Image (cartoon, grey):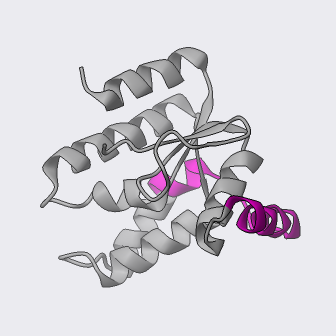
Amino acid sequence: MSTLDNTLRVTNSMRDKYFLDTNVFVYSFDERAAAKRRRALTLIRQALASGRGVVSYQVVQEFVNVALRRFARPMSASEAEQYLALVFRPLLAIHSSPELYEAALRLTGSGGLSWYDSLIVAAAQQGQCQTLYSEDLQHGRKFDELEVLNPFA
């Protein structure tokens, strides 16, 4: 059984909410990284089916930027609009706000995080998530009750 399977089983059994970082969505389209693509698709399907997956506006913005400009076959605007409706709309729970920015600034100052990483962590915390799935932050690192897990490790 893979690390991802163990991670999903623990998260699912606890009925916790979890945050998906942008790289999960990007890998779901990466045909050159088959194992990462499968893991990403599993996480996204699970998030949609369970209703426990969470993303922020930042994740949507970053993904659409990459999808329209950097994919091997870039998405069209209509494809991106359809993906937004079917995948992101059900998961989008965290909106930009002064409170989010203030929390992110505190994380930048105390946690040594970049501004964009601190926004992701703050959004996951604001969404009351127990887990943040990302390859961009240190696997196993904790921010209060939030734990970072790299699903691609």
* Residue 51 in which image quadrant: top right
Q: Residue at x 16, y 55 (%)?
A: 33
Picture layout, residue 128 above or below residue 106: above
| Residue 70 in picture, x, y percent from top left | 29, 80
Left or right: 71, with 23 as reference point:
left
Left or right: 109, with 1 as reference point:
right
Picture layout, residue 113 above or below residue 45: below
Left or right: 107, with 121 as reference point:
right
| Residue 54 in picture, x, y percent from top left | 60, 46
Q: Nearer the viewer, residue 140 or 119?
A: 140
| Residue 73 in picture, x, y percent from top left | 19, 77
List the single residue furthest toward the bottom.
69
Q: Residue at x 57, y 55 (%)?
A: 89
* Residue 153 in which image quadrant: top left
Q: Assign the magenta stretch its main secondary structure.
A: helix
* Residue 147 in which image quadrant: top right
Give yes or no for residue 107 being in the magenta stretch. Answer: yes
Give yes or no for residue 91 being in the magenta stretch. Answer: yes
Q: Residue at x 24, y 19 (%)?
A: 1
| Residue 5 in picture, x, y percent from top left | 33, 25
- Specify the segment rendered in magenta: 86-111
Q: Residue at x 12, y 61 (%)?
A: 32
Q: How many marks?
A: 0
Picture layout, residue 143 above or below residue 63: above
List the single residue furthest toward the top.
13
